[in-house]
Image: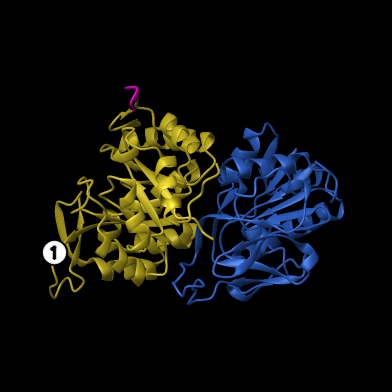
C-alpha cells in the first residue's frame, strides 16, 4: 500500500487517481499508523511553505515522513512537498524539514529570458527536464518529454550530488533531486500525461536503491 | 524552455457538449468525457470547460462530468461558468479540476478572486475577461471595456485596469476573450492581447478569433500570449492539434511535441 501524505496542503485526489490508474493500492492519509505501515510514501502538496510546515508539525507528520525515510522506504516528493524537504524556504521565510541541504528560493521579480523578454511568474505550463544522471525512477523517458509545472519557488540544493534533473526558465533551476531512497520533483507527474505516469510507474516498482533498475 | 500551450475549449450544457464535435468522418461526439480523452491523446496541453447550464440543479451533473474527466485524463483542466462562491469553487476543484475560472461573478464581486486565491492558491484561480473595443475615453483609458453576459452588458470598467486589479487580488492567470474577434475566425485581437500580457506578470491565455494555425503563431509572438484557446478550428476536424503545433514549431515557437 502507498500512503499519500495529507497535510492539508491542497487537493491530493489527482495524485491518488493517477496512482490508482496504474493499478496500485493507495490511501490519502494523515494517519500515522497507516503511514508507518505503508510500503512506500508520496509526499505531495500545493500551497504556501509556511502554512504547510505548520500543518505538518501540528499533525505529527514531520516525524512520520522522517521515519519512513529512515526505514528505507521509497519516498516521492512532488511540488511543495519537494520544496519543503530542504532546510528553509524564501516563501514565508519558513524553516523546513532539512532532509536535504539547501533552500527553496523564488524566481526573480523582474524575470527575463536571454533576449530580455519578460517571463511570467508563476512558471506555469509544460517544460522539459535535462537529466543529469541516470536514476531508476526517471528511466525510459524520451529526451523530448515535457512535464507540467506550476510554481513561483524552486529548490536550490547545496549538494550537487542530489541533483538529478534541471529545467530552463530564464535561469537553470533544479527540477528533480534524489538521495538514497528519496526522489523529489518540482513538476506534477500526476498531471504530465504519459511521461508523468511513467515516472509514477517507475516509482511504484522501485526498491529505493540508486543504481538498481526498477 | 517553457512551451506555449494550446488549449481546446469545450462548452457543456446539462452534461453534454453544446455542439457535438463533427469530424470529417461525420462522427458526432456529445460526451465531454470522450472529447477530453480525445484531446488528451491528440496532444492538447490543457482543456477548458465552460458550463453554460442555466439551472442550479444541473450543477451536480457537471460535477460528475468533472470527476469522470479527472479519472480519464492526466493533465490540467479548468472549469468555469456560474461559479459565484468559494463553495462553488471548492466543489469543482474537489471533483478534480486543476483550476476554476470566474468571469461575470468576479466583475460583480471582485473579492471572490481574493477569497479563492487565499483558500486554494493563486494557481487555481483563472480570471476570464470578455472585452469589447470601445475607443479611448475617461472611463476606458485603454480603449477596451469589460462586458458580461456573453458581451451583452457593458460594465463601465476598463479592461487594462481590471486585469491589473485581478492580478493584485490574487488571480493566477487571465483568459482574455475578445468579443470583437470571437467567432470571426479572422485572428485573435493582437493589440489587446499584447497590451494586457505586457501589463501583468501572470500568464495570459488568448481567446477568440482563431481560424488557421498562423493566427496562433501571431498571438503567441506579436500578441505575447502564453497560451492560445481554440474551439471550432479543431472541433470540426479542420485541423488537428498536431498540425497546429507543427506549424508553430516550424516558426521557431516552442511547443510540446511529445505526448
Q: Is residue B85 left or right of residue A56?
A: left
Question: Is the residue marked by circle 1 packed among few (<14), some (14-19), or many (20+) residues within 10 Å?
Answer: some
Confirm whether the magenta stretch covers residue B26: yes
Q: Is residue B248 visible?
A: yes
Query: x%, y% of residue B234?
Result: 35, 38
What secondary structure predominates along the stretch shown in magenta?
Answer: loop
Q: Please state which of residues A146 and A18 is positioned toward the viewer in this rendering.
A: A146
State which quadrant residue B63 falls in. Answer: top left
Query: x%, y% of residue B172?
Result: 43, 61
Q: Residue furthest top?
A: B26
Q: Which residues are magenta?
A: B23-28
Which chain is displayed in yellow in the rendered image?
Answer: B
Q: Please state which of residues A144 and B29 is positioned toward the viewer in this rendering.
A: A144
| In this view, A50 is above or below A29 | below
Residue marked by disc 1 = B134
**Chain where mark 1 sits:** B
Which chain is displayed in blue in the rendered image?
Answer: A
| In this view, A79 is above or below B210 | below
Q: Please state which of residues B82 and A155 is positioned toward the viewer in this rendering.
A: A155
Q: How many marks?
A: 1
Amino acid at each position: 500500500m502507498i500512503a499519500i501524505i495529507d497535510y492539508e496542503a491542497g487537493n491530493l485526489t489527482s495524485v491518488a487517481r493517477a496512482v490508482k490508474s496504474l493499478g496500485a493500492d493507495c490511501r490519502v492519509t494523515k494517519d500515522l499508523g497507516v503511514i508507518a505501515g505503508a510500503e512506500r510514501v508520496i509526499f505531495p502538496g500545493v500551497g504556501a511553505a509556511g502554512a504547510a510546515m505548520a500543518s505538518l508539525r501540528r499533525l505529527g507528520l514531520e516525524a512520520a515522513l522522517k521515519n519512513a525515510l529512515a526505514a528505507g522506504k521509497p519516498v516521492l516528493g512532488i511540488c511543495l512537498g519537494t520544496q519543503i524537504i530542504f532546510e528553509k524556504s524564501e516563501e514565508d521565510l519558513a524553516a523546513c524539514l532539512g532532509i536535504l541541504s539547501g533552500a527553496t528560493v523564488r524566481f526573480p521579480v523582474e524575470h527575463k529570458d536571454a533576449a530580455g523578454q519578460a517571463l511570467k511568474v508563476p512558471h506555469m505550463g509544460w517544460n522539459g527536464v535535462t537529466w543529469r544522471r541516470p536514476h531508476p525512477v526517471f528511466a525510459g523517458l524520451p529526451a523530448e518529454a515535457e512535464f507540467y509545472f506550476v510554481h513561483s519557488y524552486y529548490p536550490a540544493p547545496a549538494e550537487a550530488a542530489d541533483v538529478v534533473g534541471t529545467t530552463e526558465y530564464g535561469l537553470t533551476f533544479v527540477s528533480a533531486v534524489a538521495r538514497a531512497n528519496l526522489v523529489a520533483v518540482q513538476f506534477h507527474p500526476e498531471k504530465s500525461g504519459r511521461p508523468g505516469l511513467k515516472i509514477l510507474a517507475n516509482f511504484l516498482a522501485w526498491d529505493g536503491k540508486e543504481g538498481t533498475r526498477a | 524552455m517553457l512551451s506555449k500551450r494550446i488549449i481546446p475549449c469545450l462548452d457543456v450544457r446539462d452534461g453534454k457538449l453544446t455542439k457535438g464535435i463533427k469530424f470529417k468522418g461525420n462522427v458526432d461526439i456529445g460526451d465531454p468525457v470522450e472529447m477530453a480523452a480525445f484531446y488528451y491523446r491528440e496532444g492538447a496541453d490543457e482543456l477548458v470547460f465552460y458550463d453554460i447550464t442555466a439551472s442550479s440543479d444541473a450543477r451536480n451533473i457537471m460535477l460528475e462530468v468533472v470527476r469522470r474527466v479527472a479519472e480519464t485524463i492526466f493533465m490540467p483542466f479548468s472549469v468555469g461558468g456560474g461559479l459565484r462562491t468559494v463553495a462553488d469553487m471548492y466543489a469543482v476543484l474537489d471533483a478534480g479540476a486543476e483550476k476554476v475560472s470566474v468571469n461575470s461573478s468576479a466583475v460583480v464581486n471582485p473579492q471572490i478572486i481574493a477569497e479563492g486565491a487565499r483558500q486554494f492558491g493563486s494557481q487555481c484561480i483563472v480570471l476570464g475577461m470578455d472585452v469589447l473595443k470601445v475607443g479611448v475615453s475617461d472611463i476606458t483609458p485603454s480603449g477596451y471595456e469589460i462586458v458580461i453576459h456573453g458581451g451583452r452588458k457593458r460594465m463601465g470598467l476598463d479592461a487594462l485596469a481590471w486585469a491589473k486589479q485581478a492580478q493584485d487580488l490574487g488571480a493566477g492567470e487571465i483568459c482574455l476573450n475578445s468579443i470583437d474577434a470571437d467567432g470571426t475566425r479572422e485572428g485573435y485581437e493582437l493589440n489587446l492581447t499584447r497590451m494586457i500580457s505586457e501589463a501583468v506578470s501572470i500568464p495570459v491565455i488568448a481567446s477568440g478569433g482563431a481560424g488557421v494555425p498562423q493566427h496562433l503563431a501571431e498571438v503567441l509572438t506579436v500578441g505575447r500570449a502564453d497560451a492560445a484557446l481554440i474551439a471550432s478550428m479543431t472541433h470540426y476536424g479542420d485541423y488537428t492539434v498536431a498540425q497546429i503545433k507543427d506549424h508553430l514549431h516550424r516558426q521557431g515557437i516552442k511547443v510540446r511535441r511529445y505526448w
